[in-house]
Image (tube, rainbow, N blue to C red):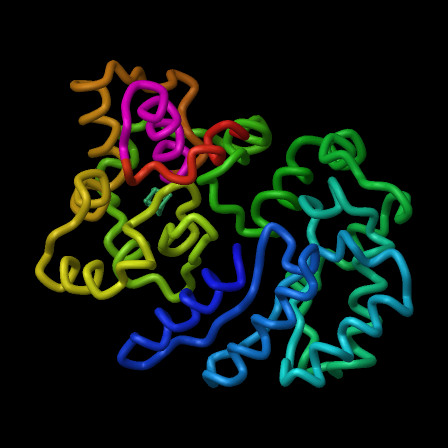
Amino acid sequence: MSPAALQEALDAITLWPIPPQVHFTGGEPFLQFELLLDGVHWAVERGIVNYVETSASWCIDDEEVHRRFVTLREAGLEAILISCSPFHAEKIPPARTLRAVQASLEVFGTRGTIVYLPEYLKIIQLFDIDRPTPLSHYEETFGVDEAGRVLWQGYGIISGGRAGYKLGHLIPKYPAESFAETNCMLDLLYAHHSHFDLYGNYISGFCGGLTIGSWRELHQVFEDFRAGRYPPLIEILIARGPYGLAQMAREDYGYQPNPAGYTGKCHLCVDVRRHMVRTGDFFELSPLPFYDHL
Ligand code: SF4
């Protein structure tokens, strides 16, 4: 995200009747530390800063981690959120996560150190902490049932990404019809936690790869939503959920439900969207690279 776009996004947030608190996340915001620091300054000026989230991937040197945290604290930041899970440990040596937690405790104290999720601090140290841990290790070590509990229930996975494809064999699956009674009104219209990305996408809740509009036109999005005007795919999801989307995709775009079933409603949703993105041009299915990595 360019500095100008970041300022524009922060200004857009102040248009809310009650501006929400902002967290900086990624990707990995520390990859562009100068920009992150500017962003914290600008958010502090606007009174909307909450916390900065990090994967700790960059935390290889004690002094550097400490110095950057102190710099952010002096800019007015009060909290750091450190991601801690088998999914992060799959790419990031746990030693880096532990280093980030330690430095954050020293700089921000216990109140300003959020570990998400602390239950995993012990679990990620069961394997070599100086190397990433492949997710297959959990299944090999604990067996299918326990791996399912550790990876799925323990993290509360939302299956709207790769989880249903890569880890679906660890938990039960259900046919598409079993999601016929669910819709996504709360997730899309009343999300407590949403994201603005660098492309201008306003991503509601945790619905990755699905935009409800552009944060650059927030006034218009608010006006349309208040009047009950939604982008076509969003309208289907609000009214009929992913099963409604699957029915539409089956009739109009040749989608075939997976006979093996789905791990959850978001797995069905992302499977339908993955099919649709290959068959047409839908503004709601963005950013497109999301679908390349499923
Ligand atoms: S089913 Fe789709 S729209 Fe609904 S909450 Fe899940 S990802 Fe979001």
In the drawing, does residue 200 fall left or right of residue 178?
right
In percent of width and height, residue 22 lies at 48, 72
Asked if residue 110 can be seen in this view, the reply is yes
- Given residues 291 and 141, the one toward you in this image is 291
Name the chief secondary structure element in magenta: helix
Q: Quadrant of residue 226?
A: bottom left
The image quadrant that residue 54 belongs to is: bottom right
Residue 193 location in percent, x, y? 42, 63
Q: Residue at x 85, y 48 (%)?
A: 126
Q: As displayed, is residue 261 above or below residue 171?
A: above
View extreme (left): residue: 227
Residue in front for this viewpoint, 32 or 260: 32
The image shows residue 261 at horizontal and vertical percentages of 40, 24
Q: Which quarter is ligand 1 in?
A: top left
Q: Is 81 placed above or below 125 here?
A: below
Give 267 or 232, whichever is nearer the viewer: 232
In the image, taking residue 75 as reference, residue 134 lies left or right, namely right
Q: Is residue 261 left or right of residue 58?
A: left
For the record, the magenta segment spans 265-282
**236 in magenta:** no
Q: Residue at x 78, y 33 (%)?
A: 137
Whole-percent x, y for residue 265 in the image: 36, 39
Q: Residue at x 51, y 85 (%)?
A: 45
